[in-house]
Image: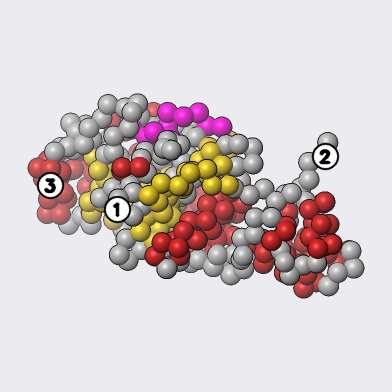
Amino acid sequence: MTTKPNIRNLSKADLTDWFTERGEKAFRARQAWEWLWSHHAGSFEEMTSLSKNMRAQLKDNFSLPFLSIDTVQQSSDGTVKTRFRSVDNNTFEGVLIPTAKRQTACVSSQCGCSLNCRFCATGYMDRKRNLGFDEIYDQVATINKQSYEQAGKKLTNVVYMGMGEPLLNYKNMMKSIERITAPDGLGMSPKRITVSTSGITKMIHKLAEDKVRFNLALSLHAPTDEKRTRIMPFNAKNNIASLMEALNDFYARTKNDITFEYILFKDLNDGIEDAKALIKRYRQVPVRVINIIEYNAIDDAHFEKPDKEKTEAFMDYLSRHNVNARLRKSRGKDIDAACGQLANKGK
């Protein structure tokens, strides 16, 4: 049996050709395009401005894979975690993170992950496959709807910080951002989008080469190769020196914001010597801010977060040396929605 092509893989020109070849006016293609992207239609039946016959023809010729919602959990702090299910029965999670000033969607780029970071729940899962650009888009569009329903506000930011490594799904990541930022898509500014990477050196250079318009966050988490490789084994092939070079290339060609993400682990990377080494890295790259993140416990790992006094000493040392750092409070911990906790858990 021949699988019908996914209609969302068609360009607007392709769709126009398909309609005009059947004797339809070009504006019908525009209507169908709006249903697919602006109105986020989940089926051909929803495209009510098209005739029943035309909807039937679309259904006969194309598929429209669409994410279903498997579960939704709401945290006591307002964070909403959604487990999505794809048409091939894979699941992955996206999170709505509301604050007083922002409504942020945190989205996944892969089913599972292949990088095996020791502190991350997703890293203990097998990588089943990359997500399609339309699946990433569906997460953002669905979370945008949740934002309207919960707060009466549209999303202000999108972060690619969910399950998987975005730069190992480069083509789909890039195309999803094109659709999210397109005026006939979700119309978001690329400056409101941040792609987070664990540190794939050659792909950061690729971002620079492509002169992308969105921001970049590096999950650094340790200031020396010895410590970073211990918790992020792939660092052995993507060492910190190569990452600093790649980030400088990225900034030189794009002038987009760069952020360091740094989870504090008790007795691993939370001492004053670690702070000194982190400052050295901070000075090597035009980093806008270092987000210091609380460690969130997961079942498979045995790390702990430092006590309050040690965290304060670490932050104070950075502050006294004129480092722009902020302690980021984790959201959604009670529903396993916080940084490093996404693993398809929950009801």
Report which residue position mark 1 lands on. 77
Classify 332 as above or below 127: below
Q: How many marks?
A: 3
Q: Residue at x 63, y 49 (%)?
A: 66
Task: Give the amino acid type for the residue marked by disc 3 in the picture.
Answer: Glu
Give the quarter of the image for residue 22: bottom right
Give the quarter of the image for residue 278: top left
In the rendered image, is residue 132 in sight? Answer: yes
Kindly state the secondary structure of the residue where label 1 is placed.
loop
Residue 201 or residue 70, whichever sits in front: 70
Which comes before the other along the chain, label 3 or label 1? 1
Density class for disc 2 (Cα within 10 Å; few <14, some 14-19, many ≥20) is few
Which mark identifies residue 312?
3
Which comes before the other along the chain, label 1 or label 2? 2
Image x and y of residue 273, in percent: 15, 38
Image x and y of residue 131, in percent: 58, 43
Q: Is there CB contact under 8 Å for labels 3 and 1? A: no
Report which residue position mark 2 lands on. 2
Which comes before the other along the chain, label 2 or label 3? 2
Q: Residue at x 16, y 49 (%)?
A: 315
Circle 3 or circle 1, nearest the eye: 1
Q: Which residues are magenta?
A: 119-128
Residue 312 or residue 80, whichever sits in front: 80
Classify 60 as above or below 12: above
Mark-to-mark CA distance, 1 and 2: 47 Å
Task: Give the amino acid type for the residue marked by disc 1 in the picture.
Answer: Asp
Tell me, yes or no, whether the highlighted magenta stretch contains residue 124. Answer: yes
